[in-house]
Image: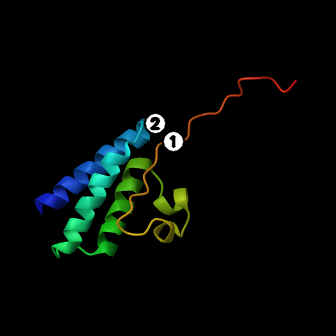
Amino acid sequence: MNPIREELERRWQQLLERAAAGDDLPPALRLRAEGLMEALVLTGDAEPAALSAAMAEAWQRAMGEPLAATLGEDWETVHPFPAIPFYQARAPVVPSTGDD
């Protein structure tokens, strides 16, 4: 396998592990992985559709549900290549004051 592709998959895994644990997903991690996705396309080693499909498969393996179930069927329109739509879980909101 291409070493850039191996590194990309490692970074996807790192992002997904953090997301599954409810940890912060620093934008720099996502942006670097997106750069690797662009590099693979620019060098002719991958097609955008194939990378998007592989990313969606990685999400499903890690999160147990399709990316489309989480973000909607149009996720690729909302997050065009090379955007990585991995987000941490929303923090629970607890009111700090009563309704009085």
Horizontal placement of 87 versus 4: left or right? right
Whether label 2 touches label 1, CB < 8 Å? yes
Query: Residue type at mark 1?
Result: Ala
Q: Residue at x 47, y 43 (%)?
A: 88
The structure residue drawn at horizontal position 31% and vertical position 73%, both measured from the top left corner, is: 48
Above or below: residue 55 compared with residue 19: below
Q: Earlier in the sequence, mark 2 or mark 1?
A: 2
Please say if 63 is above or below 94. below
Amino acid found under the numbered disc labelled 2 = Gly
Tag 1 residue: 89
Q: Residues within 10 Å of mark 1 (few under 14, many from 20)?
A: some
Q: Is residue 55 left or right of residue 7?
A: right
Taking 80 as reference, is 70 left or right? Answer: right
Q: Is residue 19 above or below residue 100?
A: below
Q: Secondary structure at mark 2?
A: loop
Task: Judge whether 99 appears above or below 70 on screen.
Answer: above
Q: Which quarter of the rendered picture does the N terminus lie within?
A: bottom left
Determine the secondary structure under disc 1: loop
Residue pictured at 39% horizontal, 62% vertical: 83
Label drawn at residue 38:
none
Q: Report which residue position mark 2 lands on.
A: 22
Pick out the residue farthest to the right: 100
Q: Which colour style is shown?
A: rainbow
Q: Position of residue 60 (x, y in %)?
A: 41, 55
Q: CA distance from mark 2 to mark 1?
A: 6 Å
Q: Position of residue 24 (x, y in %)?
A: 42, 37
- The foreground one among 54 and 96 is 96
